[in-house]
């Protein structure tokens, strides 16, 4: 199965921009897919996204874990390692 991280965010969201800068250019060991909640309402609904930014670790089509809010790079890597 293929693992990936869905990063749910919005262009108007300050914490989303902060998280994007934190993750920019980083090799997380898992592909990171950006999802704009305004442009992808159906996918956002599928994963019950209630706030942004939200990272959702997906294995195949199944959610394995999620992490919300603007996080540090260390916290994101720690979260990935725990999955």
Image (spheres, grey):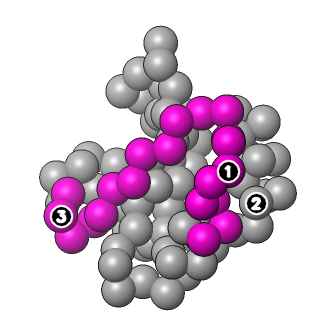
C-alpha gap between disc 1 and disc 3:
25 Å
Chain-order first, disc 1 or disc 3: 1
Q: What residue does disc 1 label?
A: 26
Q: What residue does disc 3 label?
A: 39
Name the residue at the top extreme.
1
Q: Position of residue 19 (x, y in %)?
A: 59, 70
Q: Nearer the viewer, mark 1 or mark 2?
A: 1
Q: What residue does disc 2 label?
A: 73
Provide the secondary structure element on which disc 2 rests.
helix
Q: Is residue 69 above or below residue 58?
A: below
- Left or right: where 19 falls relative to 48: right
Predominant SS along the magenta part: loop
> What is the span of residues highlighted in magenta in the rendered image?
21-40
- Left or right: where 66 falls relative to 44: right
C-alpha gap between disc 2 and disc 3:
26 Å
Q: Looking at the image, do the residues carrying marks 1 and 2 touch, with CB atoms under 8 Å apart? A: yes
Answer whether residue 28 is visible to the viewer in this image.
Answer: yes
């Amino acid at each position: 199965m293929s693992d990936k991280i869905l990063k749910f965010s919005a262009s108007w969201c300050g914490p989303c921009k902060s998280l994007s800068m934190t993750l920019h250019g980083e090799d997380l060991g898992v592909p990171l897919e950006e999802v704009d909640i305004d442009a992808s309402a159906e996918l956002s609904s599928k994963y019950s996204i209630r706030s942004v930014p939200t990272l959702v670790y997906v294995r195949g089509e199944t959610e394995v874990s999620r992490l919300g809010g603007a996080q540090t790079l260390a916290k994101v890597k720690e979260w990935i390692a725990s999955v």
